C-alpha cells in the first residue's frame, strides 16, 4: 500500500511540474526596418486566464536588439514593445515566449514611421502575423 501511495505522489508531482513549465514560442516573419522607422512586437492574450509572456526583437544575425518580460497579461490584454531610431536598421523578426499553447494568443510584428524627433507619425504600415 505504501508503494502504491509513493507511485501516485510521484506521478502527481511529474504532472504538476509538466503543467507549470508548459510554454510555447511564436515567431513572426522578418520585416525590413529603415531609418526613421519603429519595429514593434505585440501580442494579445485570447485565452481565459492570466498568462506570462516575453518578447524579443531579433536582427538578421540572431542578436536580441530589444526585449521585455516576463509580463503577466490577463484575458484580452495586449503586451509588447518596440525599438527604432538610428540603432535599428535592417531585417528583424519577433520572438514570443508564452505560457500555455499558441492558440491562446494572437501576435504580430509591426512597422511604424517616426518623425525626426523619434515620435510615431501615423498608424501601422506593415502587420505580419506571428505563428
Image: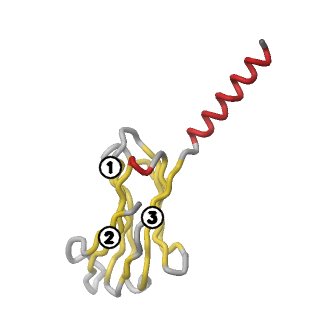
Return the disc, 2 or 3, that comes first in the chain's sequence: 3
Q: Residue 86: x and y, percent?
A: 40, 86
Q: Which residue is mark 1?
A: 77
Give the CA distance from mark 1 to mark 3: 19 Å
**Dot 2, crowdedness within 10 Å: few (<14), some or many (≥20)?**
many
Q: Which mark is residue 112?
A: none
SS at mark 1?
Answer: loop
Q: Which residue is mark 3?
A: 27
Q: Which residue is mark 2?
A: 110
- Which residue is pictured at 41% across the width and 75% down the height? 30
Quick check: 39 above or below 70?
below
Q: Is residue 53 left or right of residue 35?
A: right
Q: Is residue 97 left or right of residue 130?
A: right
Q: Is residue 95 left or right of residue 38?
A: right
Return the disc, 2 or 1, that comes first in the chain's sequence: 1
SS at mark 3?
Answer: strand
Mark nearest the camera among 2 and 1 is: 2
Q: Residue 124: x and y, percent?
A: 24, 71
Residue lying at the far left in this picture: please name it. Answer: 122
Mark nearest the camera among 1 and 3 is: 3
Return the disc, 1 or 3, that comes first in the chain's sequence: 3
Quick check: 43 above or below 85?
above
Q: Quadrant of the N terminus?
A: top right
Give the CA distance from mark 2 to mark 3: 13 Å
**Dot 1, crowdedness within 10 Å: few (<14), some or many (≥20)?**
few
The answer to whether mark 2 and mark 1 are in CB contact below 8 A is no
Q: Residue 118: x and y, percent?
A: 30, 80
SS at mark 2?
Answer: strand
**Dot 3, crowdedness within 10 Å: few (<14), some or many (≥20)?**
some
Quick check: 34 above or below 49?
below
- Which residue is pictured at 43% across the width and 76% down the height? 92
Q: Is residue 44 left or right of residue 52?
A: left
Amino acid at each position: 500500500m505504501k508503494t502504491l501511495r509513493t507511485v501516485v505522489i510521484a506521478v502527481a508531482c511529474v504532472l504538476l511540474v509538466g503543467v507549470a513549465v508548459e510554454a510555447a514560442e511564436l515567431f513572426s516573419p522578418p520585416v525590413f526596418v529603415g531609418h526613421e522607422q519603429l519595429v514593434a512586437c505585440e501580442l494579445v492574450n485570447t485565452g481565459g486566464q492570466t498568462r506570462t509572456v516575453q518578447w524579443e526583437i531579433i536582427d538578421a544575425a540572431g542578436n536580441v536588439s530589444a526585449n521585455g518580460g516576463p509580463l503577466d497579461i490577463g484575458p484580452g490584454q495586449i503586451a509588447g514593445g518596440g525599438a527604432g531610431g538610428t540603432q535599428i536598421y535592417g531585417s528583424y523578426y519577433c520572438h514570443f515566449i508564452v505560457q500555455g499553447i499558441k492558440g491562446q494568443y494572437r501576435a504580430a510584428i509591426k512597422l511604424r514611421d517616426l518623425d525626426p524627433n523619434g515620435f510615431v507619425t501615423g498608424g501601422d504600415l506593415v502587420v505580419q502575423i506571428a505563428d
